[in-house]
Image (tube, helix red, strand yellow):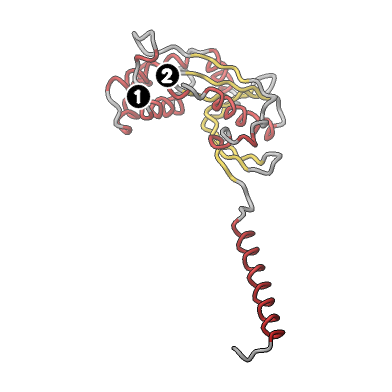
Amino acid sequence: MKDVAPAVLRRGLETYQSWKTGRDDAIAAAQRPSIDVMTATVAATNESLAPVGRDIDVATEMVGGSRGVADASQRPGGQRFGSLVHAMIADMPLDAPDARTIARLASAHGRVMGADAAEIDAAEEIVLRVLTHPVLQAATRANRDGRCYREMPVTWRTNTGAIIEGFVDLAYEDDPGFVVVDFKTDRELDGALDRYQRQVRIYAAAVAAATGRPTRAVLMRV
């Protein structure tokens, strides 16, 4: 009002400004997350988490290509094919699997994903080759003793306070400790090898933190 004394007006403005500042501070504080949660995939691209698992070596293993195809670039590729291969690896039996079982598994997953015949045949051959790899042979032996874990969910709080969540494709226990395996198709690895190495390091570091055992990491190109 025009007839309000300047001192009264000033006190009113100061009171309002104090309230507004407090309100803005409260809104800013409420916008800051109290828990920093991310997937392992996202964590692998986060530069602030680059040191996580740096002391863990990653061995890159190669599994041969599809039937009759020497060059893996000639076989099917893309997200659907990669998903088909991963689904089959997750479900394939480790103990004495036979070609007929793998073929039925490929057909069932292929129908669900709408894959064509070429993709199903290639995925079937890849999985058969995966099963003969020494890493999978070791996993099979561990599985007989109940020391093998597949599609294992992990949740890990790092030293920075960040919580990382994800699924480990395969982990098994041997005499030195644990082996953590992450499967990637060749197309997935194109131009992203460093990022996927960081991802499997994160998984291995999480398993080491949970078990207190030495852990090795394997990135398996299929």
Identify the disc placed on residue 127. 2
Residue 71: quarter of image = top left
The foreground one among 155 and 73 is 73
Identify which residue is drawn at 42% across, 22% down.
187
Residue 143: quarter of image = top right
Amino acid beneath label 2: Val
Q: Is residue 135 left or right of residue 131?
A: right
The foreground one among 11 and 142 is 11
Q: Earlier in the sequence, mark 2 or mark 1?
A: 1
- At label 2, counting other C-alpha atoms closer than 10 Å, the crowd grade (few under 14, some 14-19, many 20 or more) is many
Identify which residue is drawn at 56% across, 17% down.
60
Going by the picture, which residue comes out furthest to the bottom?
3
Residue 100: quarter of image = top left
- SS class of the residue under badge 2? helix
Q: CA distance from mark 2 to mark 1?
A: 9 Å
Identify which residue is drawn at 69% across, 34% down.
209
Residue 116, horizontal then vertical, whole percent: 27, 25
- SS class of the residue under badge 1? helix
